[in-house]
Every structure is written in structure tokens, then in C-alpha cells.
Image (cartoon, helix red, strand yellow):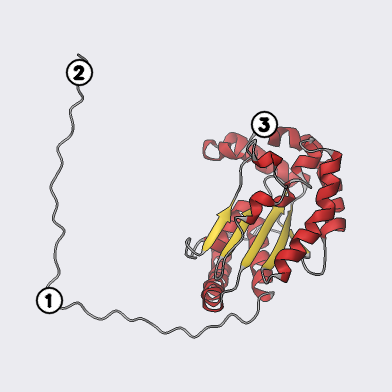
Amino acid sequence: MKPLKRKDYEARLKPLQLELAAMARWASHCGARIVVVMEGRDTAGKGGAIGAITEHLNPRQCRVVALPKPSEREATQWYFQRYISHLPAAGEIVLFDRSWYNRAGVEKVMGYCTDEQYERFLQQAPVFERGITDDGILLFKYWLCVDQAQQEERFAERAEEPLKSWKLSPIDLKAREKYADYTAAREAMLKATHTTHAPWTLVDFNDQRVGRLTLLRDLLDRLPDTRVPVEPLGLPPLKGKLHKERYSVLKPIKPQRGG
């Protein structure tokens, strides 16, 4: 199948983004709390999918959470503790660019946690998610799927493109050799944490544009009816003449010579 052309992609994306804007109005109107978890292999396309959702939403209402490595203090906390403060209040939408599921993926495969910590996570994650969904938070968990051949192409693109080099880390290079290990870790994670109250949805992201459209359509279809009457504000004409901006041209500052 040929990749979806940009022109066709943008034509299909716009109506979905209009629905997302309506969803945001609905969330603000009724006080809904929405969490979207984006997980997947390196290069899968999490950032692009999140960008497609947030592009036309108010950043004061819709936040992206991408936490760095835990601090020394955070490493001694209950594992889920540092994620709790980022959960949404009424009317807010939070998208996790990677989430608490780091423990079931990167930390497990790369040996950054103990077997005991890993097993405890698999036991506690469904309980943690039961708690937040019972409290009324709408939780959506997505895993973005990408074949190893496609992943290698994207790694090569990052290595060759200076503007994308920041996306390639030493951990990514080590992870390239562990594709099968990540597959096994994902299957164990799905078996333990795919529940009726917080199910996983797997989306094919070998074609990232098609993947984004599929994910957005699924997300919107799983929300309740989000139509809220909109009263247009209108833009009445200003009275009187228009004013020009007044400003002074600043002179260049001459560098001071050392004394």
C-alpha cells in the first residue's frame, strides 16, 4: 500500500481536529477529565500523534506530560506517585508521552528496575487505573505499532537529519538490538493490564499519517456525544479611527571594552 500523501492526509485531518475542538469545549462545559496514554517503540510516532491532537487546542486546557528520568527523591517514592500530580482537574485533557508504563517497557528490557519492582508494577497498574477511572477520569491507552524494518528507516533518518538528531539517544541505540525483547515485554504488559476499565488499543503506525487518523477517529468515537451549543461572539466594528503603534527605534548597544 502506498503511503498516504500529505495533501490527502491534511484534508482528512482537518474535520477530525474540528471534532477535537468540539470535544475540548464539551470537556470544559461538563467538567470531564480526560487522560490519553501514548506508548510504543522508539520512532513509532507518539510525538506526531500527540501533536495532531493538541495542534488547535488551548494549551491551558490540554497539557502534554513527558517526564524525564526520576530524581533521586522520586526514585524512593511509590512508583505511581509522581504521575498523580499530573492527572487532570475538571475540564482538562492530559496526554502522556510515555507514562507509568515505562516500567513495563524500557525499565524492564534495559534492566533499570528489579524483577520485584517489575512484578509489583504489573500487579498494581490495574488497581491504580481502577482507582482513577472509578473517580470519573476517562482513560484511553494506545500502543503504537511499528515493524522493525520501518523502525530502522526512521532511526537512519534521525541519524542523518541534524534537526532530528536530538531524538536519537544512546539508549535508543542499545534498544535497537532488543526488538524481540520489547515484543515479549509488551505482550506480558498487555496480558496483565488490558482490563475492562482500562483497555489497550493497538494502532498500526507503519504509515504514521494513517496511524494518526485512525487513532484520532477511535478516540473521538469512544467519547460520549460531545456536541455543545456554541454562541458565536461576533466582532462588532470599533468606534472611531484606528491607532498606529507608537515606538522608538532602539540604537544598537556598543560592546564595552575590558578595563
- SS for callout 3: helix
Q: Are marks 1 and 3 in contact (CB under 8 Å)?
A: no
Please say if 45 is above or below 176: below
* Residue occupied by mark 3: 170
| Disc 3 packing (10 Å; few <14; some 14–19; many ≥20) | few
The amino acid type of the residue labelled 1 equals Gly
What is the quadrant of the C terminus in the image? top left
The amino acid type of the residue labelled 3 equals Pro
Q: Are marks 2 and 3 in contact (CB under 8 Å)?
A: no
Q: Earlier in the sequence, mark 1 or mark 3?
A: 3
Please say if 46 is above or below 255: below
| Disc 1 packing (10 Å; few <14; some 14–19; many ≥20) | few
* Residue occupied by mark 1: 240
Q: Is residue 220 left or right of residue 184?
A: left
Mark 2 → mark 3, Cα distance in angstroms: 43 Å
Picture coordinates of residue 86 (x, y %)?
Answer: 60, 56
Q: Is residue 172 left or right of residue 239?
A: right
Name the residue nearer the viewer: 233 or 165.
233
Q: Quadrant of residue 20?
A: bottom right
Query: Which one is in front in this view, the residue at disc 1 or the one at disc 2?
Result: 2
Mark 1 → mark 3, Cα distance in angstroms: 62 Å
* Residue occupied by mark 2: 257
Picture coordinates of residue 230 (x, y %)?
Answer: 46, 83
Name the residue nearer the viewer: 32 or 170.
32
- SS for callout 1: loop
Picture coordinates of residue 127 (x, y %)?
Answer: 80, 60
Q: Quadrant of residue 68?
A: top right
- The residue positioned 15% from the left and 41% from the top of the image is 250
Q: Quadrant of residue 242?
A: bottom left
Number of numbered discs on residues: 3
Residue 99 visible in the current orientation: no
Q: Earlier in the sequence, mark 2 or mark 3?
A: 3
